[in-house]
Image (cartoon, grey):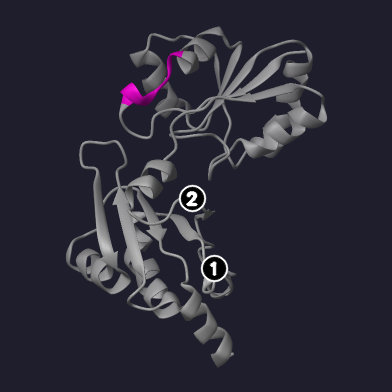
Amino acid sequence: MGILYLVPTPVGNLEDITYRALRILKEADLILAEDTRTTGILLKHFEIKNAMLSYHKFNEHQAVCSVVSRLNAGETVAVVSDAGTPGISDPGFLVAREAVKAGVEVVCLPGATAFVPALVASGLPCDRFCFEGFLPVKKGRATRLAALSSESRTLVFYESPHRLVKTLTQFVETFGPERQVAVCREISKVHEESVRGTLEEVLAHFTETEPRGEFVIVLAGCEEKESKKKNTNE
């Protein structure tokens, strides 16, 4: 039996990769990469020349059987996404699930992921939180937001720059303009920035300043008195 490794890669600064991650990538018989061009840049930087295979959300269902077969044959396979930890809003879950079903050892290395530093640096409670990743783009979006309106834990979302203002506007409508939020962009990169304040204040900032980069939104949970008010109104 081979071993399936889920290997986190830097979300920005290449110094964030671990020695162990580099060793696994060098020793793997095959590297499954979300985008071989992006991963190729990383491997070239660290002088790693192992075989890569494209593995992304559009082909993972077709590719997973052959990957499990290679694992069953004794090969070591490493899965990487373009940035961060595979399986966290990126391909990785399906192959891990099928490997577990086949009795293959699955190991996830600790390492980079965007939402953890954003959450910890937000100034909002991080002892209990709810990770939502990307909200549905259209169908089910309003329903999901409504379901989260009374969530007391800190909420964490991923968002793209072209949808950020729309999302913050919807948050104001759903959670109220005074709810505290931290919007972090370009984690660990040169232009890393955190904008903190009320939803109304942060929305005003990004309405005036064009959003650029990749974003993590950390939103305060519903306070007990706010939750009671919602329940009374219902």
Q: Residue at x 58, y 12 (%)?
A: 28
- Identify the image quadrant of the N terminus: top right
Q: Residue farthest to the right? A: 102
Q: Is residue 102 above or below residue 122?
A: above
Q: Earlier in the sequence, mark 1 or mark 2?
A: 2
Q: Residue 173: x, y in percent?
A: 41, 80
- Identify the image quadrant of the C terminus: bottom right
Q: Is residue 192 left or right of residue 9?
A: left
Q: Residue at x 63, y 18 (%)?
A: 77
**143 or 52, which lies in front?**
143
* Residue stretch rendered in magenta on the structure: 14-19
Secondary structure under tag 2 reads loop
Q: Is residue 37 left or right of residue 3?
A: left
Secondary structure under tag 1 reads loop
The amino acid type, in three-letter code, at marker 2 is Asp
Q: Residue 6: x, y in percent?
A: 58, 27
Residue located beneath label 1 in the image? 151
Residue located beneath label 2 in the image? 127
Question: What crowding class fits label 1: few (fewer than 14 Cα within 10 Å), some (14-19), or many (20 or more)?
Answer: some
The amino acid type, in three-letter code, at marker 1 is Glu
Q: Residue 102: x, y in percent?
A: 82, 26
**Cβ atoms at labels 1 and 2 below 8 Å apart:** no
Q: Quadrant of residue 206?
A: bottom left
